Image (cartoon, rainbow, N blue to C red):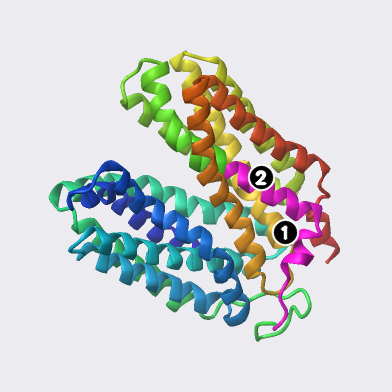
Amino acid sequence: MLAAVAVAVAVGFGVVAPAIPEFARSFGVGKTAAGAVVSAFALMRFVSALGGGRLVDAFGERVILATGIGIVAVSTGLAGLSQSYLQLLLLRGVGGIGSAMFTISATALLFRVVDGSSRGRATGLFQSGFLIGGLLGPLVGGFLTDVSLRLPFYVYAVSLIAAGSIGALFLSSARLRSDTDADADEEPATATSLREAWASPAYQAAVIVNFAIGWAFFGVRMSLIPLFVIEALNQRAIWTGVGFVCASLAQVSFLVIAGRFVDSKGRRPAMIAGTAVAGASLVALALTTSLPVFLAAMTAMGVGGAFMGTAPGAVVGDVMSGRGGRVVAVFGMASDAGAITGPLAAGWLADQLSFGAAFAACAVVLFIGTAAAVRMPETLELQVAR
């Protein structure tokens, strides 16, 4: 059910993504101001994440999940009715707060409805919901944007209502696990504090790897690859799309394999392999001006992303006991921080030195994640002991 919610949310987000810059520009603002509408959503997600985690610890995952989806749905529908740029900017910022509440509560709930022996596969299934929705959404969004700049916002609001309905109908009876009282019918009052989680080298490694995911996958890949294809490879923009499709298909195809590996062989080897493969793909991009090598590197990045997208989350679930809203919030904030700083650093390096330098720096960030994973203890053994 959480995977179904993820599909509905991701489809809606993909639908509205192509329309946001154009809708902002329709109010007569420049490109920077149009970009600020996108940044406002991400910035408010980041600054409100820790508060969302506190709300999860206080009121429970399912209440905050439904509330967060409701906030995004209402703010998105109102954004479609915006009569000025300022209204659009403010409403997208409010949507970012609701998005943070949803993401944190959904992830925390996932970690509590599955046990340690299946946490990797469950995380992979949950991630596949976002990936599938992310692939389908922009296809529909481009068509709807041609019809009307406001229509995608309304469709997104409807998809969020569908996601909220799924959550209300099917997640209300979900049995939440507690390490202190596995047979309890009610949610435990206890929660894992951030200090307790941070004392674990495994949690530290998961946070570092998630920062690397944000830097490489949500930051550098999205901001630099399109420019790299056109300016360095001297290829048409269509090859950017082909490269992203290669990465996405590889990631989706390997998620099930990665989930099984995480649950059978362990979180630590999966994190080592994922960061190493992704780092090697960035090294290849730093050294190439060949289109076939570019496509192979993007495919390898997707394979590494499948392992990186499942193992760190499983680690966070392993170190949690009872509610862990703030623990999940900091974990998610690491990815957001990487997505914010990665494009800025990579763009500066590309301007001052070269695309190769930017990709090499990204590879270093990923290899730091590899080093952190090497020194962490295996948390799957902790689940077996429990």
Q: Which residue in the rendered view is the most extreme toward the left?
A: 147
379 with respect to 124 (left or right): right
| Mark identifier at residue 52 | none
| Neighbours of disc 2 within 10 Å: few (<14), some (14-19), many (20+) | many
Q: Quadrant of the C terminus?
A: bottom right
Amino acid type, label 1: Ser
For the residue pair 285 and 128, the one nearer the viewer reads as: 285
203 with respect to 57 (left or right): right
34 with respect to 65 (left or right): left
Which contiguous range is marked in magenta? Answer: 189-213
For the residue pair 36 and 109, the one nearer the viewer reads as: 36
Tell me if residue 158 is in the magenta stretch: no
Q: Is residue 194 visible?
A: yes
Q: How far across and down, in percent of the image, does residue 69 sit?
A: 41, 70
- Residue located at (74% from left, 78% from top): 182
Q: How far across and down, in percent of the image, does residue 39 sit?
A: 40, 51
Q: Are marks 1 and 2 in contact (CB under 8 Å)?
A: no
User: In the rendered image, which residue does mark 2 sit on?
Assistant: 209
Look at the picture and state if 255 lies above or below 1.
above
Looking at the rendering, which quadrant does residue 42 occupy?
bottom left
Amino acid type, label 2: Val
- In this view, the mark in front (1 or 2): 2
Tell me if residue 212 is in the magenta stretch: yes
Q: How far across and down, in percent of the image, does residue 183 sit?
A: 73, 82
Q: CA distance from mark 1 to mark 2?
A: 21 Å
User: In the rendered image, which residue does mark 1 sit on?
Assistant: 117
Q: How far across and down, in percent of the image, does residue 120 sit?
A: 65, 53
Query: Which badge, 1 or 2, is on the more N-terminal residue?
Result: 1
Look at the picture and state if 99 lies above or below 249.
below
